[in-house]
Amino acid sequence: MADALKNKIADVFDEPACGTNVSKSEQQRKKGCAKPLTPGAAAGGCAFDGAKIALQPIVDVAHLVHAPLACEGNGWDNRGAASSGSERYRTGFTTDLTELDIVMGYGEKKLFRAIREVIGVEQPPAVFVYSTCVPALIGDDIDAVCKAATAKFGTPCIPINAPGYVGSKNLGNKLAGEAMLDHVIGTLEPEECTPYDINIVGDYNLSGELWQVKPLLDRLGIRILGSMSADARYRQVAMMHRAKVTMMVCSKALINVARKLEERHGIPFFEGSFYGISDTSDALRTMCRMLVERGADEDLLDRCETLIAEEEAKIWAELNAYRPKVEGKKVLLYTGGHKSWSVVAALQELGMEVIGTSVRKATEEDKERVKEIMQTDAHMFDNMAPKDMYRLLKEAGADVLMSGGRSQFVALKAKVPWVDVNQEKHEPYAGYMGMLDLVRAIDRALNNPMWADLRGPAPWDEPLPDLGGYVPPLRGTCPVTNASTEGATPIPSVRVTQASAERPNAAAGEGIGSFVSSQTDFEDC
Amino acid sequence: MAKLTHPKRALSTNPLKSSAPLGAALAYLGIEGAVPLFHGSQGCTAFAMVHLVRHFKEAVPLQTTAMNEVSTILGGAEQIEEAIENLRKKSNPRFIGIASTALTETRGEDVVGELREIVTRRTDFADTAIVYASTPDFAGGLEDGWARAVEAIVETLVPSIDPVFKSTNPRQVNLLCGSALTPAEIEEIVRLIRAFGLEPIVLPDLSSSLDGHVSENWAGTSLGGTRLDDIGRMVESAFTLAIGESMRPAAKLIEDRTFAPYRIFQSVTGLKPVDALVRTLMGLSGQQDAPPSVKRDRARLIDASLDAHFHIGGLKVAVAADPDLLFALSSCLSGLGAEIVTAVTTTTANGITERVPAEEVVVGDLGDFEHLASGTGAQLLVTHAHGRHAAHRLHLPLLRAGFPINDRLGAQDICRVGYRGTRAFLYEIANIVLAQHHRAKPEDFGAAPIPEEFEHVPQIATH
Ligand code: SF4
């Protein structure tokens, strides 16, 4: 591994603003957060994946992946980040390294040519060049190539040094942030600055979630100046250093960016979430307070309170209409963790019972909050193996599973309703209106009349009435399926116990806490 | 004969091919109780898994040896052993199919030798069949990876026999399925074979593992597929039917080991190709006639061709797919008078590309495809789901074929083989053409439009 990259990783691991990190001893901290992976029981994405996820929502940039086919061929155009402008980010550019390129060491030359070609065709504001395992292993120097290309073509070519094998997706997020700090942020100046300029960091604008929140900001006169990521343009990343406040949305993944913006440019940051009603209000409040501290007009605070009061009243009125449909239903939550507390609170408010929630990525502080909301820690669990989750759902421990895409089929195959709340979902659930969409989705899933039919008995599960008469038994095998008809009796002589469409009613959330945590975080890809 | 061209460029835009290890994993999933295992860094596995899950809308077991930089440089034998051990503990698979990746192949390891050593030493692994295929990402695509995996399965699990002791079951045949076949297509071919009173052993059999069904239990392995003892029984088969040119090496290998002659069916889409299969089946089952249902289906296909040729004849089609699928679909369409104006494929390992009924076959990506299709005046695009962007930009209809089809449901149910599948395919194409609303205007022919003064202008009522 190149020394520069090694230092970068060490630097990223030593994140003073990270809660988990602060509570570690000096020695532990040096080791970094990377847990050794278990062969045969690992499921996460690689650092390159993480870097790409973090940066791909910068929509007008050409994202060029320097790799053999695996990295981009299986992964391009696979996320739901939405754009209101350029669609360039959806185009998969790769050097598609062949055996010859690798053996003969043509990698760097090919990369340089590829950069020239992509600039020629697309004329993008910048080219992001991603390193991956194979070029890193054979020692391709993408920094040098990018430097030469920038000088030659005049278009910024930014090296994103996060080859897959250096670590997890999370590390990749951070390395991507570092690349932005090193090469992009601060390279362009906005035409004008206002005291209402903010940075948004770390929301990927899945299916347009940012746009559910933007109207609120618009009404308060707050401008998103800098953005990483969320439907961002390259120029917005380059101008981040001029905002007044940075909001880190939902995720600590890019905390290094927020902190270094503070360190280098004096921009304070806060963590907030737009999931759930109370969190949305809190985020708006904090944002306005900080803007006022940094020179915005005092009346922003009042306007903010008025807005919150209006919006909250409106949304609760609409949500209450759904209460009878969801009241008393048991929800199992299996999400990344830290972003869902406010959602939990809202669901409980509507009379739903959250029987369990995963805390696999949560910090101690987060866990305290769950305890507070749920009033006990009996419902917290880490990772659940798919097998266990299937059993739990099958035994009717929950009426609906809310989770990311990987556990979708665990629920569905157990004939249990499922609501998508993760990265690849197709519906946005942010802000006040997002909560309504979420509850609608839960209602749609839970109360679909299909479930009763699906869980009901098959034709052969119930005994036929005695038809009388005699039908000779079948002989031979079916010419099409080759199934033997031997032993099949036309009319069952054994009485079958009637299967009921009602599901057995297991005690709510019984034993969730006692589930043995599975080593593999199968949701984490 | 089509001329093969490789565009001269360093940049690949919108990849057409999926990777070779992914193809191998898919083939392994056609074995009962299987878990495919990528020998490489964990990220590749995560990408491939998401890809497979989105296509099949099923949970897909796929694991990794989780190589990191250090283990890559030192060699990964230990990682493989540990992975097998952990997998056995966790999901108790009967079959583990290992596929190498670009990372481990760049370093260059003797995995075959190391694996042999592991299996000999770890006698406790005996009840899990372990197979290894070399499938570096930088060589070939999904179809090649699939083919390598099938060869590896045959190599490891089909015993070599002495011809003197061969006891043949004259009614049993091997059916080798290439990567171009969907679960529904495998089922269709099996049906056809059984209609002749023959019993096929299907390898690999996605039709019972990834056909999309709800089973009564949750397993961390494939849910169905070719049974391991059936693979062992392949030695008794009288004949091997192989679908797709890419299955030739595997069919040969079976012949070497079991003395069962084989025949390759490069395509089973279209009247003539299916006729060839039916004649072979007649011969194998020793009858001068075909079952009435098969004859009826043929008569229906002929009728469908009569109805559809009006719409397919002269149609300009652009096709991009792995070689076997490219050949099957484009030769069927050109057999009804369509013109294959653009043909793009993924790899050259398979010689079938030269037989594609187009002037030129480009080994390229969807960027090339889009560019060529717009230049050649194509009226219809045929490729996988990622072609939707090209279709959108060119304002052309897209028929989804190949892997992945992640933006539509029921990819596993698409059936374009046999008399019945071909019939459905022809209707599909004809209906797409029929759905294009273009009403001719005088201007289309160079005539002046009807002067405006003749048009009645409704008056706004003013009472
Ligand atoms: S682990 Fe390495 S080779 Fe695999 S996808 Fe990630 S960067 Fe590419």
Image: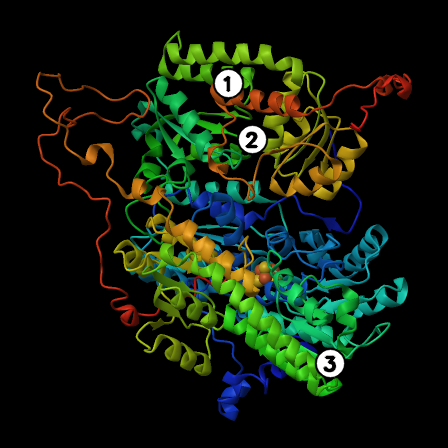
- For mark 2, give the secondary structure: helix
Q: Which residue is drawn at 30% across and 40% down?
A: A453
Q: Which residue is drawn at 34% across and 51% down?
A: A416
The image quadrant where one finds the N terminus of chain B is: top right
| Chain letter for the residue marked with disc 1 in the picture | B
- For mark 3, give the secondary structure: loop
| Disc 2 with disc 3 on a shared chain | no
Crowding around mark 3 (Cα neighbors within 10 Å: few <14, some 14 to 19, many 20+) is: many
Q: In this view, does A89 lie above or below B273?
A: below
Where does the image place residue A250, in percent across and percent down from the top left? 56, 71
- Which residue in the structure is indicated by mark 3? A244
Query: Label 1 sits on what residue type?
Result: Val
| Chain letter for the residue marked with disc 2 in the picture | B
| Disc 3 with disc 1 on a shared chain | no
Q: Is residue B39 visible?
A: yes
- Which residue in the structure is indicated by mark 1? B274
